[in-house]
Amino acid sequence: MTFESISRRGILGVFAATTVAAAPVMANAFGLLRGAGDIRRIRMYSGRTGESLDTVYWVDGKYIRDALNEINIFMRDWRTGQVIGIDPRTVDIAAASHRLLQTNEPYMMLSGYRSPKTNAMLRSRSSGVARNSLHMVGKAADLRLKSRSVSQMYKAASACQAGGVGKYSRSNFVHMDCGPIRHWGA
């Protein structure tokens, strides 16, 4: 094989495979994934609404406005129907984590945006709900995968070094947000 016969896509594929294999030991896997491809895609479904989402939301360094609008609607507060703009960095973290996990299974989204009213109601029922939750400003998602353990998801999201990651083993989900980098959970 000559240098001329190596395609850009082939080089990116090798780079992406190397990134995935080395992700658990890399301090900034998320930064590397940003340069590993031309497309970002997110796949999710909601058991609450029965809706599914499978969309490419970023191409060649630019977010796609229509795709982000679709994500905003999908991640709405399903209890009230309220929709706000979801911070694209939250979607980036979920997509990068999903890529590290090497699965085609879509995430099950348990919670995206939460209105202050919904957050207060959930907080009255559980000590695990933050008073100033990043869910209320569109910067967090609670996600689950059947094919991966909470620990695997937590490690993948933590490897991104891009926001907060909470492990909720008893409830079988991982919280991902684009706030300050921090980790919690048992």
Image: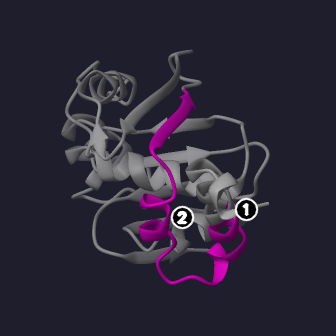
> SS for tag 1?
loop
Q: Is residue 144 visible?
A: yes
- Mark 1 vs mark 2: give the one in front: 1
Q: Quadrant of residue 114?
A: top left
Which of the 4 image quarters holds residue 67? top left
Q: Kindly indicate the quadrant of the structure image that contains residue 113.
A: top left
Q: Secondary structure at mark 2?
A: helix
Q: Quadrant of the C terminus?
A: bottom right
| Type of the residue with mark 1 | Thr
The residue furthest top is: 50
Judged left or right of residue 16, residue 165 is: left
**Range of residues picked out in magenta:** 17-45
Is residue 15 toward the left or the right of residue 37 in the image? Answer: right
Q: Whole-percent x and y of residue 94?
A: 49, 50
| Residue position marked by numbered label 1 in the rendering | 2
* Residue 21 rendering spot, x and y as whole percentages: 73, 71
Residue 88 placed where, x, y %? 30, 45
Amino acid type, mark 2: Ala
Crowding at mark 2 (Cα within 10 Å: few <14, some 14-19, many 20+): many
Most foreground residue, 1 or 165: 1
Residue that badge 2 annotates: 157
Residue located 27% across and 41% down the image: 62
